[in-house]
Image (spheres, rainbow, N blue to C red):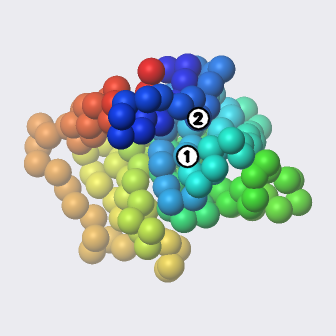
Amino acid sequence: FRRVLALDPEGRAEVLLSGQPFDHLAVGDRFIAATAGTTLYLAETADPAVKGSLEIGTGVEAMALAVSGDTVFVSGSDRTVYAIEPGPLPVQSHLLRREPLFSVGGNPIELLDTSGDSLFYAVGDVLHRFDLGLGFDQPDQLTTLPEGFKLHNRVKRIVEDRKNSLLA
């Protein structure tokens, strides 16, 4: 997708972000976030004309994306999940806060979502809950999915449906 659009109730489209091959999209109360390769693109939800962008990390490509409040969570190709607080847009490096939350072994995390208090992610067929207040996985919160159930494919289908209604 090369554009992120907003549709008003009458179906008129407004271009929010454009000019990049966007891979991932997340919308929060403050930000509309999209990624293309190693770059995170942001637009203010209240005023989409206010935009900014930043590198996720040196050579780190986005694999998944979630937004909550002032924080954008990005799963990187380096198998690390980052919490990024860009501050006011456009991004000013001295106000930018980018912290690695945790890393995983094996493949990078490709599914990521947040409730605000927790970050949910899947590794294989196992769903994890990372408590943002405590700063670690709570083993008693882990859920193993039924054998043969592919969370990735189901969530991918939901994401594709959402993308088709939000992106052109």
Q: Looking at the image, how many numbered discs can be counted on the residues?
A: 2
152 to 132, vertically: above or below: above
Q: Hey, what amino acid is under mark 2?
A: Leu
Q: Which residue is mark 2?
A: 16
Question: Mark 2 packing: few (<14 Cα in 10 Å), some, or many (20+)?
Answer: some
Q: Where in the figure is residue 111, as x and y percent of width and height?
A: 39, 44
Q: Is residue 131 visible?
A: no
**In front: 13, or 112?**
13
Question: Mark 1 packing: few (<14 Cα in 10 Å), some, or many (20+)?
Answer: many
96 to 22, vertically: above or below: below
**In front: 42, or 142?**
42
Task: Please tell me whether mark 2 sits on a helix, a strand or a loop.
Answer: strand
**In front: 62, or 30?**
30
Q: Where in the figure is residue 83, as x and y percent of width and height?
A: 61, 59
Mark number displayed over residue 32: 1
The C terminus is located in which quarter? Answer: top left
